[in-house]
Amino acid sequence: MSKPGKLRAFTATFAAGALLAVGMAGQAAADSFTLRIGAGHPNGPAVYVADVANYFVPEVKKRVEAETDHTIEFVEGYGGSIAGVAETLESVQNGILDIGAYCFCFEPAKLFLHNFPYYAPFGPSDSEQEMKAARAVYDQVPWLSETFEKEYGQKLLGLHGWDNYHLGTTDPWETVEDLKGVKIGGAGPNLPWLEFAGAIPVQSTLPDGYLSLQTGVYNGWLMFPSAYLGFKFYEPAPHYTLIGFGAMGVNGLTMNSKSFAKLPPEVQNIIMEVGRGYEEQAGKSLNARQKTGLEGLEKVGAKIRTLGDDARAGWAKSLAEFPSRQAKDADGRGMPGTEVINAYLKAVDAIGYKWPFAYEVK
């Protein structure tokens, strides 16, 4: 073949190869992604997990398919099937989970300050108000969000929480003094609430609650109605006293930073937007479960009563030093404790909530 003929053959071959490469690149751009998502609590009784399974997962799948050339699937592992309640932060950090939902209360050291709502109890009983106040603090103090990425290799997608806390017990009680010496379980950061009552605090988790109440490991639980009903704690502990320690914006949905970086920008944007949507509906979901939880407890025969306003105000006043103590503790750990807890108190004031006792951080 002459040189011109060879050149034409080479050019034709090169052009065909280029077209093939373009075609393959177009096909490669339409990718399918699989993400592992999980939580230590089960879907159903735990509202923040139910919102992951019933809102976040299907909404991300739907939007990715409708708005991009990609598809996304989730391997879901709730109820500790992939990571327990105290393992989820680390499981997201090391990539066992791509996305995890968890309560900051089970990371008392690493996320000590992220539990700030617990440090000012008797706050908003309305979860929508509480979530607005918590978000205001995160917006004012970027350190809270940045900590997840800088320290633990993950991005905060959205906040969630618990509905209004009350107290369930195996035996009836009339006055706060009756609780002296009674063993009561809780998540950890809320156990100091029991100091005023003289109760004996016992750190525990929801999955352990039923058996522990049944066998007398403890005789009470600091717990919100949605879980008290869902986990059937009313069976071993039928006495439920409405105290109103407040709703708590202390849960979060986070994603491994490396997993996030592997996704196309348009998919990243959808995940971030749906994560914020998850947060925005948290208050409504929690309020609804508070209502149905109380109605359900009444239907199954739980003995429900309400603590008087004077006793509640006295309990709050007894914890007057608690916010300052926790703020200083956080400051001593190199965290902006005073700034965060002051910001939270002001954020709650700003939504129009009236505390039974006005806390100050000194």
Image (spheres, grey):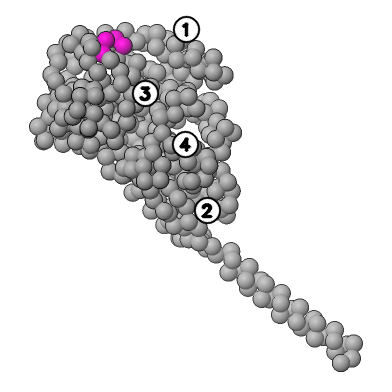
Under tag 1, what secondary structure? loop
Comes first in the chain, label 1 or label 4:
4
Write down the residue under mark 1: 362
Question: Disc 1 and disc 4: Cα gap in Å?
Answer: 32 Å
Pick the residue in front: 174 or 237. 237
The answer, for residue 194, to whether it is visible in the render is: yes
Q: Mark 2 = which residue?
A: 267
Q: Quadrant of the N terminus?
A: bottom right
Q: CA distance from mark 3 to mark 4?
A: 17 Å
Q: Label 3 vs label 1: CA separation?
A: 24 Å
**Which residue is painted at 36% across and 46% down in the image?**
81
Instruction: Tell me where residue 295 appears, x and y as whole percent.
Output: 16, 34
**Circle on res. 188:** 3
Q: Residue at x 26, y 27 (%)?
A: 223
From this view, report whether residue 34 is shown above or below residue 178: below
Q: Residues within 10 Å of mark 1 (few under 14, many from 20)?
A: few
Q: Which mark is residue 89?
A: 4
